[in-house]
Image (cartoon, rainbow, N blue to C red):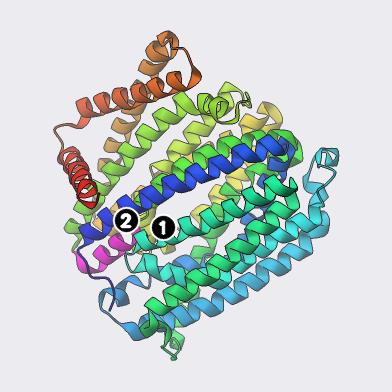
Amino acid sequence: MFNHLPRKTNIIKAFIISGVCALLNIVIGFGYRYLFLKILSIEYLGINGLFTNILGLLALAELGITGSIVYRFYDPISKDDVKKVGELMRFFKNAYIVIASAIFGVGLAITPFLKFLIKDTAEVPADVNLYIVFILFLLQSASTYLFSYKLTLLSADQKQDQFSVINIIISFGRYSSQIIVLFITKNFTLTLLAGILITMALNFIASQWVASRYKFVFSVKSKLDDKERKNIYKDTTAAMFHKIGGTVLNSTDSILLSKFIGLAVTGIYSNYYLITYNITRILGVLFQSFTSSLGNAHFMLDKDQRYEIYKKSLFLNFAAAGLMTVCAYSLINDFILIWLRKPLFLDDITVILIIIQFYIQAVRFVSMSYTSACGLFVKDKIRPLIEATLNLTISIVALKFFGIAGIFLGTIISSTLTVFWREPYLLYKHAFGKKVIEYWFEYIKNVVVVLASILILHFTVNKYLNVNGMLHFFVLKALACILIFALIHFLFFFRTEEYKYMISLIINLTKKIKRNK
């Protein structure tokens, strides 16, 4: 009834298809941003970034219930327990109706106070009604919850490839409609409206398609028993803290910038955010495709077998995050100049801090996936609140002394003091029964590889590469980043079993792609 293909097959399919879809989504997104800035000003991007962050905060209404429900799917799916999966989906549906209503209600309540989040309202373009635009954002966010719960079943059933294809179709429809309306009307509000209507329509179609594929699940009429519901509520308390912490970390940067710096700088930062977010998204799509497989493995394999899968996955995560960090540090400003044809840059210190923040997040994907898959978030429920409090406090204080750089300094310090050491400690102690020193040994080696690559690039390629044409320069510099990182990574790890596994995986992926072609 459910997906019982070999775990390795599911992971490879997710890697290939999800990776391609993520790349397509990025290309479309960057193309839209380029056209947006050709027609409208940077202040419009500032409004977009501000409202996106506000909606991120409103998503607190979800209270982490998604995580506390989703990891419960893995065990019944592995046992073909249709009744249990159906009961969970019914509970999920009712929970999301309540969440959507709460988000919309709270959003309407804060609408009159939007102007207090903007340092200088004179920066708001004359043709923008803040309240109407915000309500449009609100409608899109709330409506997503009414349909997306069904799509979650695809991920839980190790069909991340299908989930990714659906998302790229929705993204393509949204961006296409927005580009058409933007060209015709040159109106920010109508452009948003077009994207929202198409997104809602495609989400509805996708949810109906999933329901037709899993009729046996959605035909279940029974409800979860009281004991199971109480357990979900108990886990939701822990997940709620993670949700609050994560939301404060990820959804306050643009709000702080808008309040203390201004909409124009918020718009400039939004370009850096879009780049690092999309790189993170690629890594997330690739490595969070492990979540359902890791969840399946957690219930099917013993500790030593689970640890072997984790080690290989973690090595891939470290290598990919390291390479992306080296490329991002060396290429991000060059990319912005080629992409937007304007030197919309932040200062060097701020860019370095953004890259450090990106790296700290990027190396966590496999660990986060495993923590989610085996429900370890319950043992770490206070940590996100401490991290969020530290982040907000340090960011506001540091902003007064260091300007925009202080915001990212706050995130780095708060992460280092909390999740940086806490997450691996819990995994190694409770999931594997191993000493966490093994993790830190690999982590430090990867950091050395990244720093060595950056230093070599900085003192050689960045200084002495002299090529006519920005695009040629960018391509050669990107190739240099890849080759230098690959060489140093090889020197450090070529004898390890994980490195040999990575090479064999790359070879197998290449062969599979050729066969599919």
Q: As shown in the figure, which amino acid type bears the numbered disc 2?
A: Ala
Q: Quadrant of residue 198?
A: bottom right
Residue 111 location (% of width, % of height): 79, 59
Residue 352 versus residue 134: which sits nearer the camera? 134
Q: Are marks 2 and 1 in contact (CB under 8 Å)?
A: yes
Q: Residue at x 41, y 62 (%)?
A: 163
User: Does residue 506 appear in this view?
Assistant: yes
Q: Which numbered disc covers residue 164? A: 1
Q: Is residue 3 above or below residue 125?
A: below
Q: Secondary structure at mark 2?
A: helix
Residue 413 location (% of width, % of height): 53, 37
Residue 195 shown in magenta:
no
In this rendering, would 156 be left or right of 122? left
Residue numbers of the magenta segment: 290-301
Q: As shown in the figure, which amino acid type bears the numbered disc 1?
A: Ser
Query: Mark 2 highlights which residue?
Result: 14
Residue 364 versus residue 190: which sits nearer the camera? 190
Q: Secondary structure at mark 1?
A: helix
Residue 402 location (% of width, % of height): 66, 27
Residue 305 versus residue 77: which sits nearer the camera? 77
